[in-house]
Image: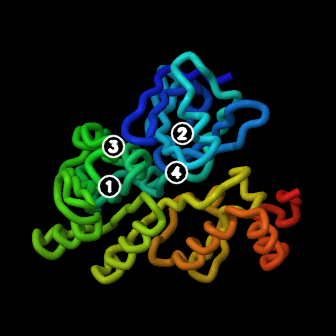
Amino acid sequence: MYQILEAEMLADKIYKMVVEAPFVARSCQPGEFLITKLDDRGERIPLTICDFDREKGTVTIIFQVVGASTYRMAELKAGDAFEDVVGPLGNPSDFVKEPIEEVKKRRYCFIAGGVGAAPVYPQVKWFKEHGIDCDVILGTRTKTTLIMEEELKEVAANLYVCTDDGSYGHPGNVTVMLKELVENQKKQYDIVVAIGPMIMMKFVCLATKEYNIPTIVSMNPIMVDGTGMCGACRLQVGDETKFACVDGPEFDGHLIDWSLAMKRMNTYKTEEGRAMLKAQEGDTHHGGCGNCGGDR
C-alpha cells in the first residue's frame, strides 16, 4: 500500500496529493509519469509526477476530476492509501540526459496550460537547481482554475500568467502571450516546451513553427497499461508510429499529427471505437510485440 501523506483541493476539481512511494521517488526524473491504482477493482490512472523528494521517499501528483476513477480519488484523504503506484514510466526530458554546458547555451520558454502546470514545475525546478534561467507562461481559462502560480514563481526567471477570460494576469490564451513576448518584447527562445490540453499544444506548435522555434510537447493521450502493449496511446510522429508511454511522453511538436491524435483520443473513449481502431490498425495497433492481445 502507498499511503497518502497530504491531500488538498487546489481549485475546482483539481487536487494535489503527496504519496509515500520511495522506490518511485528514488529514481524519477522530470518528464516521467506514474500509474496509480485505488484498489483491486480500480482503474489504472496515468499521472505526471509534479514533484518528488528522494530523502523523504515521496512523490507529488496533481490531477483533475474527469471521470469515475478520478472522482473516487478526489475523495481520498491523508491517511488513506493507493493499492499500487507504478513508476517512473516513460522517458525523462531530453535536457536531463544532455551535457549541462550544452543546455546552458539555450534559452528556454515553458508553456503550461491548466493542469499542465504540474509536469512543467519539476522541469523548471531542475533548471533552477542547475543555475539556468528560463521563462514560463502559465495559462488557464479563468482565475479560479489557476494552480501553482507561487511554486512556479519561485523557480522561473520570469513568470507570465494569463487567463482566457482576462480575469487575472494578462488577458488571452498562451499563444497570445507568446506572441507578445516574441513580437513585441523581442524575446528570443531556442526551445519552447508546451504541456497542457492537446488543443493548446497544437496551437502553440502552429505559432512556434511560424517563429521557427523548435518545440517539445508532452503527449497525454489515453493510456491503459503504460508499457506500450495496449495500443491506446499510439501517435503518428512524422512518418513513424510511436507510443506515448514508452517512446515519450515528450516529442517534437512540429512532427505530431494533431488531427489524428485528437480524433483517435475521442474515438478510443468508447468500446466500439476501440474495436474499430484495433481492426483498422491490425498488428501495429499494439506497441511492444504488437500481438499481446492487450484488448482481451
Type of the residue with mark 3? Ile
Task: Please identify the quadrant where the N terminus is shown.
Answer: top right
Instruction: Look at mark 1 in the image and give the residue it sits on.
Output: 140
Residue neighbourhood size for the residue with mark 4, other residues' Cα within 10 Å, grouped as few (<14), some (14–19), many (≥20): some
User: Gap in Å between the C-alphas at discs 2 and 3?
Assistant: 23 Å
Nearer the observer: mark 4 or 1; the answer is 1
8 relative to 63, above or below: above
Question: Which kind of residue does numbered mark 1 sit on?
Answer: Thr
Q: Which residue is at 64% across, 41% downward?
A: 69
- Residue position for label 2: 28
The residue lying at 44 percent from left, 36 percent from top is 51
Residue 289 vertical position relative to residue 280 in the rendered view, above or below? above
* Residue identifier under label 4: 92
Circle 1 Cα neighbour tier, 10 Å, few/some/many (<14 / 14–19 / ≥20): many
In three-dimensional space, the C-alpha distance between marks 1 and 3, rounded to whole angstroms, equals: 9 Å
Q: Earlier in the sequence, mark 2 or mark 3?
A: 2
What's the amino acid at mark 4?
Answer: Pro
